[in-house]
Amino acid sequence: MSQDISAKSDTVKLLTFRLGDQEYSLDIMCVREIRGWTKATPMPCAPNFMRGVINLRGTVLPVMDLAERLGLPPRAHCDRNVIIVVSHQDRMTGLLVDAVSDIIALSDSDLQPPPDASSHGVPAIIKSLTLFEDRMIRVLDLPIVVTVTQGEAA
Amino acid sequence: MTPPDPMAEIRASFFVECEELLEAMQDGLQLMDEGAHDGETIHVVFRAVHSIKGGAGAFGLNGLVRFAHKYENTLDAVRSEALAVDADLLNLFFRATDHLFDLVRAARDNADLPTAQSDSLLRELEICIGAPPAPDGAEPEIEFQPIGLALDLGCDTDAPPVLTQSPQYDIVFAPDTEMFENGNDAYPILGALAGLGECSVTCDTSRLPGLDSLAPETSYLSWTVRLTADADAAEIASMFEFVEGLCTYTITPVTEADASEPLRNVTGDIAPVVPLLPDTPSPPAANSGCEATAPPAAPKTVVRVDLDRIERLVNLVGELVINQAMMAQSLQNAGLSPHSDAMNGLEEFQRLTRDIQDSVMMIRAQPVKSLFQRMSRIVREASVAVGKEVRLISEGESTEVDKTVIESLADPLTHMIRNAVDHGLETPADRLAAGKPEGGIVRLSAAHRSGRVIMEVSDDGGGIDRARVQKIAKDKGLIPADAVLSDSEIDNLLFLPGFSTAATVSDLSGRGVGMDVVRTSIQSLGGRISIASTQGQGTTFSISLPLTLAVLDGMVVKVADETLVVPLNMVAETLTISGDTLDSIQPGVDVVRVRSGFVPLFDLGHHLGYRPKLDSYIDSAALLITHDDGTLGALVVDEIQDQRQIVIKGLDDTFGRAPGIAAATILGDGQIALILDPSDIIAKSADFKAGAPLKLEA
């Protein structure tokens, strides 16, 4: 599993997590920390996928429900839900996911471009796909996850 | 050179000092303008210009030096009472100071200013002192040596006769090598001599060998100083006290006869003559080569602190306040008796926290004076541009406001002042016709009132022409053609986007940036702006601002299980709605009777989308909110919890800002609560700023 992480230069490390029965991942370099679920303060008039804001050691951190952001069916929350704090262009955002699974190391060649998904509801939000221990793992394009939102909210 | 350029730091501090000096100049000129000056006033102004010049010279800012020098000459003429101060001259001084300000700014930003204005002002300044036809004769263009000592020629007009009363001395000063080995330097000694009187220094470099035989630690130089000072030889000798035995020096009184003999006849190569003059009664500006020394007019000690450090302190205190709230909550949850030691200690702790917080905020507080001075300049320029004679009266300059607030007030105030001059005041002819003095008055005031800062801009002009305002608003489709508006509603039309009353677009204002922008920027500071006008007597704009942007007193309320904070100063009173005070105008539009008035009800939980509208408001709590225009609105909440100090945290705008949400704060339990802007909520939901009388949501 995670023990065989080699320090090859073309290695990418991915943090994998679950949303419903699907597995997703993010480049670990953009992940700042992982927090347990705390109740978020809802923001009025925010897009649906915005859970609200939480207190991250004195700063106000916006949290989005990643499943809703990706258009997955809404589901009940449980205590195992966690918030992945990511940073993109110096801005921190919390992503609510069902559970964090693992950290995996892959080489670039293991990543395959996704089939053209633009006809589906979520254009190019999935950067690439990979097979890991026979499971398909989707690699998210974080800038799109975080920034398309701005456009939608504006 | 190491990468962090030490010069850059010195340079930065020079510009900071320039700002202070310019402020002192403005003060002095203002005093003179009011006729409240004494002999010292002109000295202060003179010294300020002089110090700026000195510093500018060291940094090679030639444009600045050139202007400051001529300005200084004219000021010197006033100082020596060769030139009498009158209104025209003061006006020129004001403009020259403004220009000096521009030059300093330009120099700081490495920008270039067109020299045309410099030149025309310089000509005016020269004419004042009887413009010597060829100033080059007396004094060639001053050349500043970066190593220069104090630099000045205040005496370009026939100075020598004045100086003959003081005895002159020739001092020859030759340091031994040993003097330098002991850590002494010739420079402070020359500076000290310059402090005694006027002196010119010549450096004798004749003993200096060629580079090949130069021993770097040997002293080769000597100086000849011609000093004109009211001092005896012993006094001069005392200057050499510290280097006694480490140098050779001679002090020879100069007789009238050889005083006329030029000093330059010293053999050998002569370094440039650097004229020295004690510029102030204070210690000489011996080190003005790299930093301008001007003793501040007021003898208060100040420390210059990096704003970042203060920010850090402010943030820490914010954390402290939050932590204290958390502690209070956990003590409460522990079920301690309110009379227990822990609870008493907590109370003490709370008091201390508040004191610390107030003190920290005081650090960031600054008098609004600098802002007001900028405004007086705006008035001067604006009045010239529109051909009106305007006098600015400012009050409460010493009122202290958070620095960040001051900075963000500059633009809105500028706009309001220009408006007052351009639109508020009538033309001189109209004023005379109305029986008013020809010159208009714009009043700018600041004062503290119940935890807020109130700033007012008022003019004694014709007041708002309400018929015209209403007509324009109708023409522009801003209000329905049949709208019946009260006076204050009409006045508030000025704040609508896209409203501009000027019949003709002037250079000054009326370019579409209207009062709505002013209002938006004031609101973003957590402030409010209101307007009052009396026909024929003038218009007053009042801005009410929080003292700080970091902390506020809030009322903590609960709505649909969410905790919200309403700024306490917005809440006029709280009430419980009972059946007999509640009325419904039409389905969905409810009012509550407060004393004799009807106040529209707004269901906060519904407006924020937390829950559907309540079926019945009976027994609900409501906060009575005062709007800028004095009207009231009642916000229905589920529960009023507490009143306390809260720390304001900025909200990320990335995901859109909901109307009515001003910021956020962190509660005692670590949860985030939103801070509301109740006026905004009501305005957005009721659309009532548009003038339509209480058209509630459809």
Image (cartoon, rainbow, N blue to C red):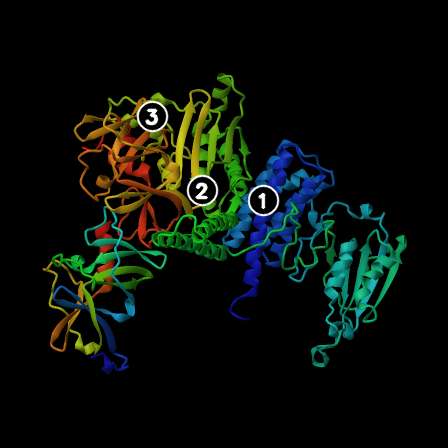
Chain at tag 1: B
Q: Position of residue A145 (x, y in %)?
A: 22, 60
Query: Which one is nearer the viewer's eye here, B554 or B101?
Result: B554
Q: How many marks?
A: 3
Alpha carbon distance from label 2 to label 1: 18 Å
* Residue drawn 44% across the image and 56% down it: B316
Identify residue type, mark 3.
Ile
Quadrant where the image shows the C terminus of chain B: top left
Rendered view: A119 above or below B401: below
Compared to residue B649, the image places residue B215 above or below, namely below
The picture places residue B443, in percent across and down from the top left corner, at 51, 31
Question: Is label 3 in a helix, a strand or a loop?
Answer: helix
Amino acid carrying mark 1 in the image: Glu
Q: Quadrant of residue B576?
A: top left
| Corner quadrant of residue A2 | bottom left
Residue B490's label in the rendered image is 3
Query: Between disc 2 and disc 1, whose residue precedes?
Result: 1
Q: Is residue B68 above or below residue A134?
A: above
Letter of the chain that mark 3 sits on in the rendering: B
Label whose residue precedes the other's in the sequence (3 or 1): 1
Q: Which residue is under mark 1?
A: B23
Tell me which amino acid carries mark 2: Leu
Q: Which residue is mark 2?
A: B409
